[in-house]
Image (cartoon, rainbow, N blue to C red):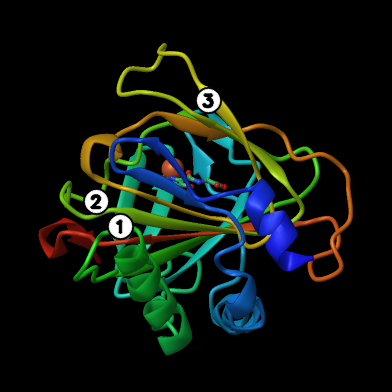
Amino acid sequence: MEDLFASLRPRTVLAEGAVWLPGFALPDASALHQAITDVSAIAPFRHFHTRMGPMSAAMTSCGACGWTADPSGYRYTRTDPQTGLFWPAMPDALRHFAVRTAAEAGYDGFDPASCLINRYAPGAGMGLHQDRDEGRPEAPVVSVSLGVPARFSFGGLTRNEPKRIIELLDGDVMVWGGASRFAWHGVSRIRETFHPQTGAMRYNLTFRAINVALFRP
Ligand code: MD6
Ligand code: FE
């Protein structure tokens, strides 16, 4: 059965530097869920408020720094602004998974400083954006989807280029870097469905290498 599904959803190069690995994280799913539980016990999920209002996806982070947002902008901080504590260390299971996955996609030597964990309830989504707060354009982003499906839009290097719509399922991984590192992308509002491990939720983990000079307190 697994093999049949794998043949229906083959590994796909979406654009130069961007590869979609359907189901690649499934063997590691329970370790990834455990890491989410452990990290969020120390750094709880929260909805950041940007200039546009509260984000619909709840977020937390682990690693040497974490992504934070407030009405004045976005940055990577060493401490969680909500607790004043350092972000929890990145669990070894997460780090090893990310390094192995990046290598699988052709990016050897990946050294993730942070993992941003997004949690989407039904109705939550993420508007079109580029990830460009990291200061390490040569390093890819490794992205893992867990739980209920999401419609992901993958575009080009300018906002209005045509988008490819991908259905990301539980255990799907995307690795993107190189010529696609600054591709525009977004997540449509999550539909109300059920997944045995996550209930109505979708989780997304993105592993990033980050220039230390950009870390804020
Ligand atoms: C998500 N992902 O899948 C949001 N960013 O929920 C991202 O915004 C993302 O998947 C950069 C690289 C890969 C991603
Ligand atoms: Fe992104």
Label 3 or label 2, whichever lies nearer to me, is 3
Q: Which residue is mark 3?
A: 164
Q: Which residue is mark 1?
A: 76
Q: How many discs mark residues in the rendered view?
A: 3
Mark 2 or mark 3, which is nearer the start of the sequence? 2
> Residue at the spot x=80%, y=71% of the render?
197
Q: Secondary structure at mark 2?
A: loop
How many residues crowd mark 3 within 10 Å: few (<14), some (14–19), many (20+)?
few
Tags 3 and 1 touching, CB below 8 Å: no
Q: Position of residue 207 (x, y in %)?
A: 39, 62
Q: Position of residue 76 (x, y in %)?
A: 30, 57
Q: Secondary structure at mark 3?
A: strand
> Residue at the spot x=84%, y=55% of the render?
200
Amino acid tagged 2: Glu
Amino acid tagged 3: Arg
Between the residue at mark 3 and the residue at mark 1, the CA separation in whole angstroms equals 29 Å
Mark 1 or mark 3, which is nearer the start of the sequence? 1
How many residues crowd mark 1 within 10 Å: few (<14), some (14–19), many (20+)?
many
Specify whether 214 is left or right of 131: left
Q: Secondary structure at mark 1?
A: strand
Q: Which mark is residue 134?
A: 2
Q: Which mark is residue 67?
A: none
Between the residue at mark 3 and the residue at mark 2, the CA separation in whole angstroms equals 24 Å
* Quadrant assignment for the C terminus: bottom left
Amino acid tagged 1: Tyr
